[in-house]
Amino acid sequence: MSRSEKSLADRTAVVTGASSGIGLAIAKRLAAAGAHVFLAGRTSGPMEQAKLAIEEAGGDAQVVIADLRDPSEVQSLVDVAVERTGRLDIMVNNAGLEFPSSIIEGSPED
């Protein structure tokens, strides 16, 4: 691993929507840079495949099943990452959610 790839050693990252697309690419890159990556989302199968791909490439990843529409599950996701690694350094909020109005007018429960 080159010096630049070690730049995130001993760091903890959470990536939401990490089962495919941009989220998966970000998770893989963070892991390649040395971060311990928590893959968060609702679909366990694709996230387990992502975890396996990261580990096969020499990275460190864990899967956390969470419905990010529920604020308590978001808090639980953060709590799990901090409990398991002692820290949270990077949070990538990539999961796509739809809100049918102005987010300013909404509440976390919306």
Image (cartoon, helix red, strand yellow):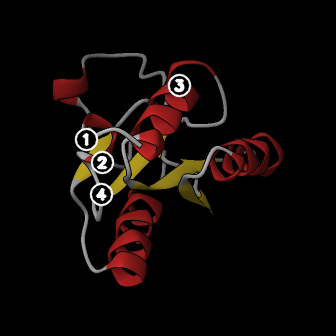
Q: Is residue 26 above or below residue 27?
A: above
Which quadrant holds the N terminus?
top left
Q: Amino acid at mark 4?
A: Ala
Report the Cα–Cα distance between label 1 and label 3: 20 Å
Q: Amino acid at mark 3?
A: Ala
**Numbered marks: total:** 4
Q: Amino acid at mark 2?
A: Lys
Image depth: mark 2 or mark 3 in front? 2
Could you say where residue 101 lies in the image, as x and y percent from the top left?
A: 33, 16
* Secondary structure of residue under mark 2: helix
Q: Is residue 69 above or below residue 55?
A: above
Residue 25: numbered disc: 3
* Tags 2 and 1 touching, CB below 8 Å: yes
* Tags 4 and 2 touching, CB below 8 Å: yes
Question: In terms of sequence position, does the residue under pointer 1 or pointer 3 come before the other?
Answer: 1
- Which one is in front, 105 or 56? 56
- Which one is in front, 35 or 108? 35
Mark 1: few, some, or many residues within 10 Å (few <14, many ≥20)?
few
Could you say where residue 74 lies in the image, as x and y percent from the top left?
A: 40, 58
